[in-house]
Image: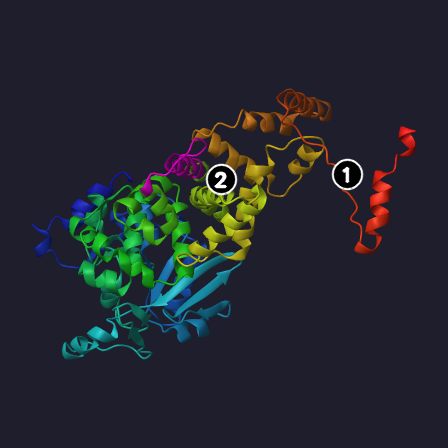
Amino acid sequence: MLTGFKTLVRKATSLFTSPEDQSYPIVIPRNNHSLSRQNLSPNAVKVLYRLNKAGYDAYLVGGCIRDHLIGAKTKDFDVVTNATPEEVHATFSNSRLIGRRFRLVHVTFGREIIEVSTFRANSAQDDNDSVHKGQTSLKGKDSARSTHGMLLRDNVYGSIEEDAERRDFTFNALYYNVQDFSIHDYCGGLKDIENKVIRIIGDPRKRYQEDPVRMLRAIRFAGKLGFEIDPSTAAPIKEMAHLLDHIPPARLFEEVLKLMGSGNGIKTFELLREYGLFRYLFPDTEALLKSGWKRDDINPEAFILQGLRNTDNRIQSGKTTAPYFLYAVLLWPSVALRHEEFLAQGMPATPALHQAASMVLDNQVASTAIPRRFSTPMREIWDMQFRLPKRYGKRAFLLLEHPRFRAGFDFLLIREASGTELGGLGDWWEAFQHATEAQQRDLIKSIDARASDNKDGPKKRRPRRRKSNSNNAASSDIKNNAPSSTNK
């Protein structure tokens, strides 16, 4: 946490003896906090000033403010305004309207996208109460719920105070005003950051019913920030986890990437299982882990934890990781189990692998959609686990040129690190990659010699017998029985 942040919170809340007595918003002037324009995306600042110049209110909101206050880096700078999406779009020529469920505007600056949303108010279900209280919404009212109470559309526009109440967690209801450089806290987010607490705004059950993905977000923040989930926020999660079944698989796919790709995958994985959410993201994997299935060459839980550990280390060291690799790790134990079942039915090894991969992927896409651009390299990584041991002749050189070699090799190292005994296969391939051509040929010869000693090397193909047609069957029999010229 940044130096002086606790002092900032104490100054902001010193007038109040208890949370019940506190009055919101708490406004932190520029001289009492360290967030400045130098900490912000220049393009986000441009959007704020442009909207202000056009006569609209505009603020930075949520994660970028929260992350700065706890000393974390942030990539996303979200803007909220009282301008409608159509008005924002008309203000920026480099923008486009997106979304039906939540109408937004993306303002593009090269590769950077600044997301601009309009202040949200109460949904249709609560709108009558707002009218009775004298609250009015801007034009563009549009809201709908499913039979399960989930918000299908939430395009009811209102004031900044209403918008704060519609945010998910208290530390995401922080707003930065570029006109006077002040921070506005509407729901006690500063105090919760100080106490490292994740607290949902409003009634937890109602908020999870509106959007079940908020349960996943609570877990993600707990894993990413190292915060504790407030008991009242955590209490309904196990009971309401089943609501994730009503979320589109494509949306859950993106959520999994955020959950496991934050550099805190192990902690997140453990929390997802603890709160009963993992089974709705990876049902086959959870069932396998719960069954306790394992065999000599794979311990599913140890393998997944090792894969997540490697991924966390890469992300924390500033390296990237491919989404398909993460999914390949999480689904490999299920592929291994199905492969074993097909082998037991007498199916050859390679067709058994392909059938196992298809079955696992078909089951998985019902929970989290996996685009073909990811499922194809996943299959290739799994296939490489059966090809990498076959290093005879020219095969090693061909495998080294395979576009998925590096991913398959890294995957193999995870298997070895999690306890799978592969006879030093990882070390062999590590040496082969960095050897000269002469050394590579010596490495292959050592494998050929060892295979010959063990009688498990590559078998020579038998010449295929030519089939004879029925009309020439008799003459064929005569030819087959006649002594050959070599035996004379």
Question: Could you tell me which residue is drawn at 21 percent across and 42 percent down?
Answer: 6
289 is higher (above) or lower (below) than 430: below
Q: Position of residue 167 (x, y in %)?
A: 27, 61
Res 59 seen here: no
* Among the two numbered marks 1 and 2 on one chain, the one whose residue lies closer to the N terminus: 2
Camera-side residue of 163 and 15: 163
Question: Could you tell me which residue is drawn at 56 percent across and 41 percent down?
Answer: 349
Question: Could you tell me which residue is drawn at 80 percent across and 50 percent down?
Answer: 468
Q: Which residue is mark 1?
A: 463
| Number of the front mark, 1 or 2 | 1
Predominant SS of the magenta segment: helix
Amino acid residing under circle 1 = Pro
Q: Residues within 10 Å of mark 2 (few under 14, many from 20)?
A: few
Q: Position of residue 204 (x, y in %)?
A: 19, 58
Camera-side residue of 157 and 327: 327
Q: Residues within 10 Å of mark 1 (few under 14, many from 20)?
A: few
Q: Which residues are magenta?
A: 291-311
User: The N terminus is located in which quarter?
Assistant: top left
Under tag 1, what secondary structure?
loop
